[in-house]
Amino acid sequence: MTALTLSTAAAAGLRADAIVVGVAKGTPSKSQGLVVAPGAEAVDKAYDGRLAAVLETLGAVGAEGEVTKLPSPAGFKTPVVLAVGLGALPESNEGFGTETLRRAAGCASRAMAGAKKAAFALPVDGADALAAIAEGTVLGAYVFDAYKVSGPGGAATARKNGKNGKNAKPPLAEATLLGGKPRDKAHKAALERAAAVCEEINRARDLVNTPPNDLTPATFAHLASTAAKEHGVKVQVLDEKELTKGGYGGILGVGAGSTAPPRLVRLVYKHPKAKQSLAFIGKGITYDSGGISLKPPGHNETMKCDMGGAAAVLSTVLAVARLGLAVEVTGWLALAENMPSGSALRPGDVLRMYSGTTVEVLNTDAEGRLVLADAISRASEDKPDAIVDVATLTGAMILALGSRTFGIMANDDAFRSTLHEISEEAGEPSWPMPLPEYLLKGMDTPTADMANMGERMGGGLVAGLFLREFVGEDITWAHLDIAGPAYNEGSAFGYTPKGGTGSGVRTLVRLAERAAAGELA
């Protein structure tokens, strides 16, 4: 991971591969062109106040995500100035938003792949801005190259021998954030938090990007156990025998067709001063073929990402433990592989869930709700103050909200609003979704208590209603459908890489922070 340091040193004297500055589109009402953002005053001065003019000559317009490189001015020890676009200059005096800074830093760190050190002279007007720049820098530098092998020694040897072209470039090794005060407690805390949370987000990304032949339910459970013990988190793993004994019909049913048996992992972090408790539940389908209801061609290739919810929950619990938050957090990883075979779950089968509810399976590709339902029922027995499940659950949510926004459903409107507020604050776009009661009737079946499918239209909402049926009495619950933003099939943008994104982690960590501060009703 990119190492982060703070510095108040003069820009000219820093030794680095490049110094990063921000530029923005000027305000039309003031007839401004390109504007150099705060933080880069010393750099601009070294260009005799003409940095913006030089960049405009090179074609820069300050658009968000735009990156322009030019030689450093005389007297600077860094050879390159990298100007990154911040978008429109704020009309007010509030400064640039944290998400703008986060994305700009991400673009800059991606552009600095292969470099040993970069100095970031972006606008820092407080600890929040500093944290956003730190997060963007680390998340933008992320590279997953564990399988980029060119002979003995793997990717490292390939880099040394100059093979694999641009894919062999390592991430930016070190970033110095100018304007951050090393002795300022708030600045130090912001940097430490950013480093811990981002390292865990990158853990989630690694898990999502790992091929399914190397990440079975048992392997995932082992990795989770190892990480949990490293950070003082208690862990319990239920294997297929214990799941059978416990009556976890949903998890067992989904995993019945695979030679890799399912697992249920329970992670517990409890601070001695905790006053509120949260349960986070993650869908962990390590590969989803659709089962007997096989997915059509073109829909299988990225289904290693169907455990993104479980990856987010694992990383959240570990981040909370590393931050030492005064809260109790229990994470549940419902892990299974959904495969077709002679022993696989069939359309028409009836499962008896952990709660005792019977469910007729009309579509084996609606499997995520089955494993989550068992985990929700079990988590409810602990009587947490709130339950939040996270899942790459429905294609319907992608159709509704696109690939960068997740949906939020809940049995409590105020809690849903809080989660929406928190996610936007954390830089993870979300949208509140309803749970229309009339859609429940679509899951009626003469064979069992309910079916795992309902009306096709509003399918994402139907899935939410299904899960709500398994929440314990008087427990506040929310469901995050991260099917869109959990896996980026397009090109990298901002601080978001191609592939696994770690969606949901920042939202859940902020929720835990609010609970630790006693800010949840």
Image (cartoon, rainbow, N blue to C red):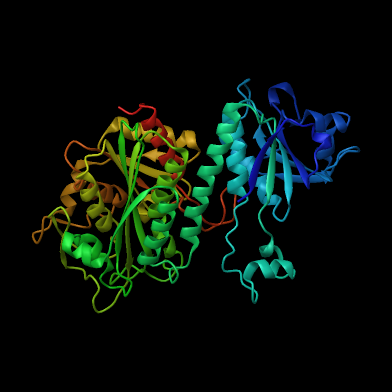
Q: Is residue 367 visible?
A: yes
Residue 96 vertical placement versus 222 (above, below): above
Residue 181 vertical placement versus 308 (above, below): above
Residue 461, percent from left and from top: 29, 47
Residue drawn at x 30%, y 65% as measured from the top left: 262
Numbered label tally = 0
Q: In the image as oriented, which residue stretches furthest toward the bottom?
A: 342
Locate the C terminus and report the quarter of the image it occupies: top left
Q: In the image as oriented, which residue stretches furthest toward the right?
A: 74
Q: Quadrant of residue 454?
A: bottom left
Residue 23, percent from left and from top: 72, 35
Residue 278, percent from left and from top: 31, 39
Residue 353 vertical placement versus 341 (above, below): above
Residue drawn at x 43%, y 64% as measured from the top left: 304
Residue 12, percent from left and from top: 83, 35
Q: Is residue 504 visible?
A: no
Towards the viewer: 388 or 378: 378
Residue 478 vertical placement versus 348 (above, below): above
Residue drawn at x 60%, y 22% as measured from the top left: 94
Q: On the picture, is 448 further left or further right than 243?
A: left
Q: On the picture, is 248 further left or further right than 478?
A: left
